[in-house]
Amino acid sequence: MNRSACLIFNPVAGQGDPDIELAEIRAILEPDIDLDIHLTTQEIDADQLAYAAVERGVDTIIASGGDGTLSAAAAALVGTDISFGIISRGTANAFATALGIPDTIAGACETILQGGTRHVDVAYCNDRPMVLLAGIGFEAETVELADRDAKNRFGMMAYVFAGIQQLRNLRKFDVEIETEDRIIKTSACAVTVANAAPPTSVLAQGPAGLVYDDGLLDLTIVAPANKAGAIAATFHLFQTASTGNAVERDDIGFLRAKQFKITTEPPQKVVLDGEIVGTTPVEIKCIPGGLKIFVPLVEEVEPTEKLEGLPNLTIEMKDTVEE
């Protein structure tokens, strides 16, 4: 008897053809999983569809779309034992990358078919579920500049272009960060609180090596003195993400805690899992093991050889003589 699952599909995510992509998902999954397919619309969001599926008593929910769609659907599953499958089809696909899930349709579907699950942390930011991160200040302004048209035209480069443009308006703000046992006051251009984040989310990489099932949140403060310092700090954070070593600059700080209360003066825009959700203040609290998600059973092995695609390629196998 086949497994069953509710598939929540965002037809406007990414840059591909949604009809072809949905057909590919069905071709891979439906031989083994009976899919109850629901499409998001301008009037009906992924979280509404997911909450309705939970009410129906489903065992598995699969969401396919960008990071916003995946996070919205995950909101309904926090604290339940419903298995969550993700098929990333967005611009950044940070959700999949941060959790080690393939960001191709075929790879993501295979992960779901394998059936391996793991409980990962989530968080609540002002009562909104957060799977990845909340960005305050520079990151939120950058995400807002990278609108849908820009992402459709330029893909991931839309965020790069928006970041360069935002550097022209780089401004510091005063920030107060309250944890369970401390109150920290400083000034910053960006504050990022991460539950999980891929290396491409450089403003979250202060501590490096973010762990998404340790019951803690990671906060990174970036406080460059000028535009040149901002560029240098960003490059340094990129290096920490690449090497796994924590930052060593005076204008970058980081700490870990179970929860944060953050206020700023003046109020700053907040981006939550890729979506602008308002302005500070924010309260963010970790929910350990709050989401049960399909993950690969084994880590993907990096290829040791790649020759396909080379011009005028010929390969001749040599005869081997055993001694």
Image: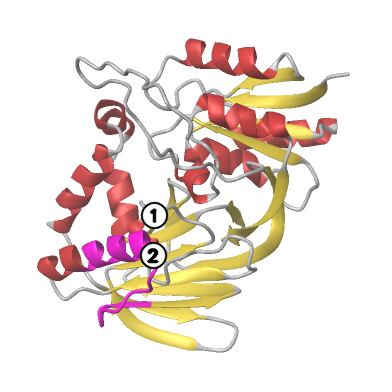
To which quarter of the image does residue 316 belong? top left
Residue topped by disc 1: 199
Secondary structure of the residue carrying tag 1 is: loop
Is residue 108 visible in this depiction of the protein?
Answer: yes
Residue topped by disc 2: 205
For the residue pair 289 and 186, the one nearer the viewer reads as 289
Identified by mark 2, the residue type is Gln
Which region of the structure is painted magenta? 233-253
Determine whether 86 is above or below 260 in the image: above
Q: Residues within 10 Å of mark 2 (few under 14, many from 20)?
A: many
Q: Is residue 309 magenta?
A: no
x then y, percent, for residue 224 = 20, 73
Is residue 268 visible in this depiction of the protein?
Answer: no
Is residue 286 rendered to the left or right of residue 158? right
Identified by mark 1, the residue type is Pro
x then y, percent, for residue 151 = 30, 32
x then y, percent, for residue 116 = 72, 41
Q: Residue at x 19, y 43 (%)?
A: 161
Determine whether 29 is above or below 86 in the image: above
N-term-proximal mark, 1 vs 2: 1
Mark 1 and 2 residues: CB-CB less than 8 Å, in contact? Answer: yes
Is residue 319 rendered to the left or right of residue 169? right
Q: Residue at x 67, y 19 (%)?
A: 29
To which quarter of the image does residue 223 belong? bottom left
Q: Residues within 10 Å of mark 1 (few under 14, many from 20)?
A: many
For the residue pair 291 and 73, the one nearer the viewer reads as 291
Cα separation, mark 1 vs mark 2, equals: 7 Å
